[in-house]
């Protein structure tokens, strides 16, 4: 097999997808690990499309945790039936699908030994990975800012109008992945965003976007502000141990928004792995390219992303059995990422936040 030719129309791609899936198939659809709104909503859309057009049954699954508060609210408020992979018997399904990720990226629970011999579908807006061509159907890459955009176009081409729940999920997926159409946006993203507006529940969108936060979140944020260091226009931060890996990405989002900052790089410790998130707010640079180059220096680990945002996950090695060893490993990765921006190794850091001052 091979990946879908990007010159094909969406209607032609939908036709190929429907020809690939047998009528009445039992389908297991997986997001990437620690799923975000784009991955969750796009997975739900794929299931609804195949349910409507092929009478398929589907189950949504994920690996890792639902960490970020708005991700949990999305699932809770929209009642999305997302089941952890450790509660799934993969043998019960005829076919599997990966959404917003690809087989070789490694940030998903459908490992090769689990899915051997099963039909594979892969739909993702990130750049094509070589092994995706081995899937029975793979539509990856393209100029979409969110996988939800691609799935919205699939639904439209198939004549399937999303119900209020699905429309709200898809809208929020596009909204969050493109930062309200402000990040890596195509004409298709604008179209999908506008198409979904009258179909979705805006009060629920607001509730998802502004969830109540645990006090532990503010503890991590305070730690980040105190520990972050700035090297010219690059801010780096080692959070140490975090209670959910999503906090690494969320902290990177926060820090890179500071005045005078171009790059934000954050690492954290979660379940014997280093999680890293990279953000850049200058379109001349690519966070995805940088992290892919750095990850080549490691025997194990996975990385992915695109222009403005990227992430990596690296298991600790044999020399990181102590807290000090793990700290050295995280800071070594931070240094490699920072130097990958072209930063001079001789640049001295300054604190991200000024020392506390008494009010005048």
Image (tube, rainbow, N blue to C red):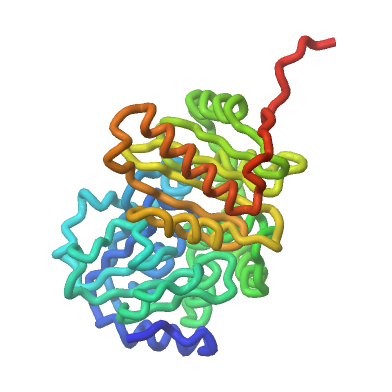
Residue lying farthest to the left in this orientation: 91
Q: Residue at x 18, y 70 (%)?
A: 116
Position of 152 with respect to 350 (left or right) is left
Q: Residue at x 51, y 65 (%)?
A: 148
Position of 315 with respect to 232 (left or right) is left
**In which quadrant is the N terminus drawn?**
bottom left
Q: Residue at x 33, y 74 (%)?
A: 121
Q: Where is residue 144? Give x, y as percent.
A: 58, 71
Q: Nearer the viewer, residue 278 or 58?
A: 278
Q: Where is residue 112? Give x, y as percent.
A: 23, 66
Q: Decide if residue 161 is in sight here.
A: no
**In which quadrant is the C terminus drawn?**
top right
Q: Decide if residue 356 is in sight here.
A: yes
Q: Nearer the viewer, residue 252 or 93?
A: 252
Q: Where is residue 298? Give x, y as percent.
A: 38, 53
Q: Where is residue 234? Give x, y as percent.
A: 66, 44
Residue lying farthest to the right in this orientation: 360
């Amino acid at each position: 097999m091979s990946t879908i030719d990007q010159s094909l129309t969406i209607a032609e791609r939908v036709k190929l997808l429907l020809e690939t899936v047998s009528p009445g198939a039992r389908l297991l659809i997986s997001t990437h690990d620690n799923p975000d709104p784009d991955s969750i909503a796009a997975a739900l859309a794929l299931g609804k499309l195949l349910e409507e057009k092929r009478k398929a049954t589907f189950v949504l699954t994920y690996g890792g945790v639902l960490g970020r508060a708005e991700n949990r609210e999305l699932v809770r408020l929209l009642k999305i039936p997302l089941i952890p992979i450790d509660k799934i018997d993969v043998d019960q399904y005829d076919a599997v699908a990966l959404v917003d990720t690809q087989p070789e990226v490694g940030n998903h629970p459908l490992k090769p030994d689990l899915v051997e011999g099963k039909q594979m579908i892969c739909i993702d807006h990130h750049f094509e990975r070589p092994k995706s061509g081995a899937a029975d159907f793979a539509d990856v890459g393209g100029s979409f800012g969110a996988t939800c955009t691609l799935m919205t176009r699939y639904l439209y081409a198939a004549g399937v109008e999303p119900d209020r729940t699905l429309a709200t999920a898809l809208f929020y997926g596009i909204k969050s992945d493109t930062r309200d159409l402000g990040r890596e946006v195509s004409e298709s993203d604008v179209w999908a965003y506008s198409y979904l507006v009258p179909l979705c529940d805006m009060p629920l969108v607001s509730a998802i976007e502004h969830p109540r936060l645990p006090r532990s979140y503010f503890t991590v944020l305070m730690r980040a502000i105190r520990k972050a260091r700035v090297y010219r226009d690059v801010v780096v931060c080692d959070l140490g141990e975090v209670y959910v890996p999503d906090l690494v990405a969320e902290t990177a989002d926060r820090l890179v928004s500071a005045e005078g900052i171009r790059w934000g790089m954050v690492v954290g410790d979660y379940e014997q792995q280093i999680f890293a998130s990279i953000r850049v707010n200058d379109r001349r640079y690519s966070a995805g390219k940088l992290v892919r180059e750095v990850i080549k220096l490691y025997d194990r680990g996975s990385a992915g992303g695109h222009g403005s945002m990227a992430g990596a996950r690296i298991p600790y090695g044999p020399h990181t059995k102590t807290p000090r060893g793990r700290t050295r490993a995280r800071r070594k990765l931070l240094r490699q990422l920072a130097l990958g921006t072209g930063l001079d190794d001789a640049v001295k850091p300054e604190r991200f936040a000024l020392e506390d001052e008494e009010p005048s």
